[in-house]
Image (cartoon, rainbow, N blue to C red):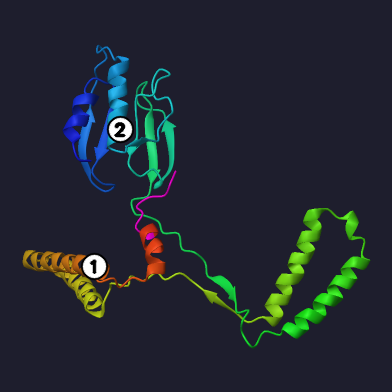
């Protein structure tokens, strides 16, 4: 959020309990106001909603929390990490909103896909043609007209897939998960930083923590430089550019 002060000036006229976070792990601003005597007009309400849209905030809490009104909102820029939310009775007449959310992003790993080598010399096309002719003759002799379209399609589909598995070579391909700009030098520095962390955590000396933080900063700087050099040098292939852009998305569409 770029301008929390602007949000604070608008929320001060509302009866809301709102926690505005700079990130999922760090609460930066906590705003709590009880202004029951303030007349909330439509223009002020529209201004608040426009401010939410300006900062790309989405409300995921729509349940009643007090006297048939929703006085508690859950505003976030990333709704997808939220698993569930419930309303439980509070100490007084004001209910409590309980949120269950991930603090780390989840990665959807695509399973390996099977790819057939139709142009391979090992593909037995002669056997496939002979067995296909026999299958067609046997299929036409059956009372296939009494079956519906889905049943006929499944029968043909299963036969073709069975022929492909038996007589056409195949292999499994998976997406590449490693980062291409992680060079050997960068990986070595990351391992050194991790070893330094274990040593520092065991010793708990202030000078060791200072040394570890300096190494952590240098590794982060080296990672950013390696990424920038990879993008500026044109090391990415043209056919992988679109996939790279998709991989940089921060959140899924909801």
Q: Give residue 114's position: percent from left, percent from top.
A: 58, 72
Which residue is labeled 2 in the image?
A: 52
Q: Magenta segment: does it hold 199?
A: no
Say if mark 2 contacts mark 1, CB within 8 Å: no
Q: Residue at x 25, y 76 (%)?
A: 187
Q: Which residues are magenta?
A: 247-254
- Quadrant where the N terminus is found in the figure: top left
Give the main secondary structure of the magenta stretch.
loop
The first of marks 2 and 1 along the sequence is: 2
Position above or below: 158 against 59: below
Position above or below: 1 against 232: above
Query: Splitting the image into 4 quarters, where does residue 67 fall?
Result: top left
Q: Secondary structure at mark 2?
A: helix
Which residue is labeled 1 in the image?
A: 232
Q: Nearer the viewer, residue 229 or 3?
A: 229
Q: Give residue 146's position: percent from left, percent from top.
A: 90, 54
Q: Give residue 129's position: percent from left, percent from top.
A: 78, 80
Query: Splitting the image into 4 quarters, where does residue 50 fall?
Result: top left
Q: Residue at x 7, y 64 (%)?
A: 206
Give neighbour class at mark 1: few <14, some 14-19, many 20+ (Cα, 10 Å). Answer: few
Q: Residue at x 19, y 30 (%)?
A: 6
Query: Splitting the image into 4 quarters, where does residue 106 fall?
Result: bottom left
Position above or below: 161 against 87: below
Q: Secondary structure at mark 1?
A: helix
Q: Magenta segment: does it hold 250?
A: yes
Name the disc covering residue 85, or none.
none
Q: Nearer the viewer, residue 215 or 115?
A: 115
Q: Residue at x 26, y 48 (%)?
A: 25
Q: Name the side, left or right, on which 159 lies relative to 72.
A: right
Q: Give residue 149's position: percent from left, percent from top.
A: 80, 54
Task: State the separation of the CA atoms marked 2 and 1.
Answer: 36 Å
Q: Residue furthest front?
A: 238
């Amino acid at each position: 959020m770029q301008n929390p002060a602007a949000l604070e000036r608008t929320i001060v006229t509302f009866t809301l309990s709102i926690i505005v976070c700079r990130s999922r792990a760090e609460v930066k601003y906590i705003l709590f106001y009880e202004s029951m005597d303030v007349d909330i007009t439509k223009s002020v309400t529209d201004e608040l909603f426009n401010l939410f849209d300006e900062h790309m905030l989405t409300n995921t809490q729509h349940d009643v929390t007090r006297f048939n009104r929703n006085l508690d909102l859950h505003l976030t820029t990333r709704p997808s990490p939220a698993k569930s939310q419930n309303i439980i009775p509070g100490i007084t007449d004001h209910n409590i909103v309980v949120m269950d959310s991930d603090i780390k992003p989840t990665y959807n790993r695509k399973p390996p896909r099977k790819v057939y080598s139709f142009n391979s010399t090992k593909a037995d096309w002669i056997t496939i043609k002979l067995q296909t002719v026999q299958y067609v003759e046997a299929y036409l002799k059956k009372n296939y007209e009494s079956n519906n379209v889905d049943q006929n399609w499944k029968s043909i589909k299963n036969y073709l897939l069975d022929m492909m598995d038996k007589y056409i070579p195949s292999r499994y391909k998976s997406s590449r998960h490693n980062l291409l700009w992680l060079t050997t030098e960068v990986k070595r520095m990351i391992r050194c930083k991790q070893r330094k962390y274990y040593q520092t955590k065991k010793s708990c000396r202030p000078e060791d923590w200072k040394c570890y933080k300096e190494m952590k900063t240098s590794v982060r700087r080296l990672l950013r430089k390696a990424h920038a050099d990879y993008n500026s040098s044109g090391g990415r292939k043209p056919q992988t550019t679109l996939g790279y852009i998709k991989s940089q998305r921060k959140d899924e569409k909801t």
